[in-house]
Image: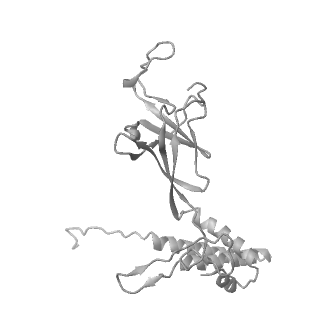
Amino acid sequence: MSSQTNTQYIYQVKNNKLFLWKIRSIGDSVPTTSGEITSSGTNRVIYPPENITNGLRIEYGSLDSLFVDNDPNALSSDSSETSWGNPTLTEESTPSETSHLNLSRTLSLAMVDYVKAMMSDQSGDLERREIYMRDFYKKVGDDKSNTYRVSLSFPASPYAVR
Amino acid sequence: MTVLEIMERAGTTDTELVIAYLKDAYTAIQSNAPKTHRVKKQDISKATSGTSNQYNIPADMVNLVSVSVLDTEDDNKYKEISRLTGNLIVSEDTSP
């Protein structure tokens, strides 16, 4: 039984562990082992005092599968404006030359620049490596700015004629 | 775009090396803006030892979006909880 969990629980992250506490407010003071009832005027935190099945929900971002079996940028079906389907992508755990990259076209081209940069690095041509890496980050930046495009509009001043 | 197309554009024939480079590049891209949104749940247990308020964070996590706790009194809704800033005085309670 848990109630008002949004105000009664707090958490802290330390490295790969999540520490969970419950807040004990002044109103629900209980006697200590020595019979003392504490009321210090501040809230205290205690360890979770209850069992809650599937009680902790962690929402997070993670890496997606890079190598898939189908082209992620092509529709699987496209018969009309209202009838179409996205491709079903299955991860390929052992990628090969025929595997598709699960990326947009722009990011796929960025990948080409990265591979070229690493090939230049391998051959000791550091100047060319820097050029390709710059192109890589430029394409990654273009892709992000296209994805998260934000438009700003400003109201016209009533005294616009000056 | 397939791996073969990448190799042809980069002018190399070493498949395994290119796949390794692609994984590196992908990590560099995704570490800034993760693509997949995931949710994991686990049981909350009544604390019985000094470490029983510690829960595992999913190993594939790149960034944390939110943490919620189930409210069984309010139609089983998960409600987001706040993150504690600063440090507590007690680092471990040996008799919770």
Residue B38 seen in this snapshot: yes
**Residue at x 51%, y 16% (from the top left corner):** A33
Residue B84 seen in this snapshot: no
Figure check: A31 above or below A114:
above
**Residue at x 50%, y 35% (from the top left corner):** A21
Which quadrant does the N terminus of chain B fall into?
bottom right
Q: Position of residue A149 (x, y in %)?
A: 42, 71
As drawn, the residue found furthest toward the right would be A123
Q: Is B81 or A127 nearer to us in this picture?
A: B81
Q: Position of residue B69 (x, y in %)?
A: 44, 43
Q: Is B18 or B51 nearer to us in this picture?
A: B51
Examine the image and state in which quarter residue B53 appears: top right
Q: Position of residue B45 (x, y in %)?
A: 52, 37
Q: Is A136 or B74 nearer to us in this picture?
A: B74
Q: Would residue B49 appear left or right of A130 to someone viewing this image?
A: left
Figure check: A37 above or below A59:
above
Examine the image and state in which quarter residue A157 appears: bottom left
| Colour basis | one colour
Q: Position of residue A104 (x, y in %)?
A: 53, 76
Q: Is A121 or A162 nearer to us in this picture?
A: A121
Figure check: A43 above or below B57:
above
As drawn, the residue found furthest toward the front would be A53
**Residue at x 56%, y 79% (from the top left corner):** A70
Which quadrant does the C terminus of chain B fall into?
top right
Figure check: A42 above or below A140:
above
